[in-house]
Amino acid sequence: MFSFSALILILAISSGLRAQDKTPQTFNAQGVSIEFTATPTSPEFQKVVAGQEATVRFKITGSNGGVPLANLRPVAWLDQRQTNDAIGARECREKVQSFLQPSFSKRPTIDLNAYFILALNNEPNISVIDSLSGFGGSKLYTLIPLSSPGEDWVMTADNKRLYVSMPAANALAVVDIPTWKVIDTINVGVMPMRLALQHDERYLWIDNTAGSSAESRVTVVDTVSLKVVKQLVTGLGHHEIAFSDDDSIAFVTNDETRTVSIVDVRTLKVLKQISTGVLPSAIAFSSLSKTAYVAVQGDGTIMAIGGPRHEVIARIPTEPGTSVLGIPSSGHYGFALNPAKSTVYVFDLSSNRLLQKVPVGPGSDQISFTQQFAYVRSTGSEFVTMIKLADIGKEAAVTKFPAGQRAPAESQSHASAAAIVAAPEDGSVLVANPADKTIYYYTEGMAAPMGSFQNYKRDPRALLVMDNSLRETVRGVYSTTVRLNAAGQYDVAFLLDSPRVVNCFELSVAENPNAPKKPETAIKIEPLANEAVANAGTRFKVRFKVIDSKTGAAKTDLNDLTVLVFLSPGIWQQRDFASSLGEGVYETSFVPPSAGVYYVFFQSASLGLSFNSLTPLTIQAVKN
């Protein structure tokens, strides 16, 4: 991560070069050559168009010899221009510097550097937190409303779609990540709980936990058509689901029937049932041993199901109460967690033998992994236990760090999804503590978290990370996929920290011929403050300038400009007319009843402007 405060910008602007979708723009400085292209991902289009995905690509080589430069940390922003005129050196420098110190009034159209933290809340919504501007506090980027509180979720590998189970609504929410909107809600049967997405992402499998009811089944959804293709009756009770590496077989536990179902994914038919004993509670598939492991809570056995006939090939004894399994993506060991005994059992995936027992915190119920450590969340303690993977087989090195002030069990909020997830930075994790209503950021080697993200009085029950940053896809090539929703001219502000080089490339986004043309709004709203932070219980003034969208002139004659202020998620609101202060500047005020995120919308009957025509202003209210 580069140091923003230490940046000394060296600026140069390419001259006379207009952006063409498939024609590279090249810039040379400080012995480095940077080649920029933006190409549509769909073969249907020959150029970048609004509403369609495009690949943004920077090829970085040495100016002499063209040697690819690997392991760099370039950063970039896409920002739509207000006019078609190219910006100069000074404007580009100011734009980059403003993006390095983000505020709500100077946010780029798309930030290609930060990652977003998604929190599955106890309320029927998902918080999306901008990690770059939110570190050390909270910058709620947006809030995704759901029909009812979510229980489990899964994101596609390209970070474009999110699926969320909603047991109280008997439905599945489908979220489009580029727009942060729910694009479909699918009826998927009674009490959808756990989700499992195949490796090829063709089918999404959903556990319908309905106890001994006839409604207990597994629902399979086609991710292309978003239609239910099958409701499998595998057995009664709660279902955990895992897949073979080639997605040919699905393994489904049925805890009340006390079986594991072997399902042919191609035909969606149950091939056989395997008896397990009391409460098969977890299942995981090992790519190393090509074996499915089942934790049987009743007697503590870990069953190994493998071979061409999918038979029980081993039974690994632990202790009654073992109910959680975890297998790192790389490594030779599996981990079984027993909340009743506050113990992790480590077993060898090659020999199917128990290696050792590791004590953990009280009420431990989840295990997550980075390359170096296994992290165990304890509901009965604020401390997270870390087990060093390199020491498995020897005396395991166990350390702890406090993820908050209170034990997670002090909150009634709980979800099946993971509360500890790896952050994009190597050796770092994010930990949700619903009792503190806070998300903690921890880096390996530290005694305590380095910082935290507030969640505006919401209990974060589970976390996901959506990494939007540039990635080195080929040596010296850094790219990502974006979707620009509006046609027009964009500045592509690029910064390389070492050697320190800045350049503003250009990108033209065409109108989408297949999309209905969005009517232009008559005005633009420009906030007159860099930051919008209010004190709860104290009157706060919101001042803004109204500008004619076509002429750029200030609008001084608006008598019907209505302002709607509401506290997310809509539990308090105020409507009032804006007062003119002259020269196109208007003002409204309100008293925030409590800390939280407030949205400010605008409406004008004379201009045909409705509350959803313009992007709302966002105001953070904090305790006084």
Image (tube, rainbow, N blue to C red):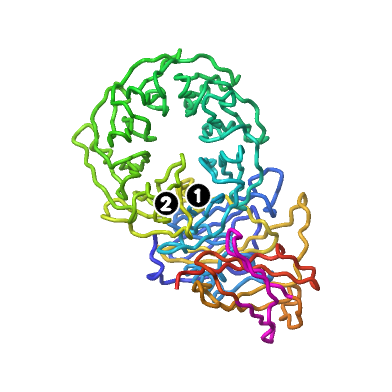
Horizontal and vertical percent position of residue 614? 69, 66
Question: In the image, what residue type sits under mark 2?
Answer: Pro
Residue placed under numbered mark 1 in the picture: 122
Q: Is 255 or 115 nearer to us in this picture? A: 255
The mark that comes first in sequence, 2 or 1, is: 1
Residue 405 visible here: yes
Q: Is 65 or 26 nearer to us in this picture? A: 26
Q: Is residue 89 above or below residue 364?
A: below
Q: Is residue 377 above or below residue 329?
A: below
Residue most extreme to the left: 395
Question: In the image, what residue type sits under mark 1?
Answer: Asn
Q: Are marks 2 and 1 in contact (CB under 8 Å)?
A: yes
Horizontal and vertical percent position of residue 500? 42, 66
Quick one: SS at disc 2? loop
Q: Tell me: 199 left or right of 419.
A: right
Q: How many marks?
A: 2
Horizontal and vertical percent position of residue 274? 45, 15
Give the position of the N terminus as an image quadrant: bottom left
Which secondary structure dominates the residues rendered in magenta?
A: strand
Q: Image point 60% across, 52% down: which residue?
A: 145
Residue placed under numbered mark 2 in the picture: 434
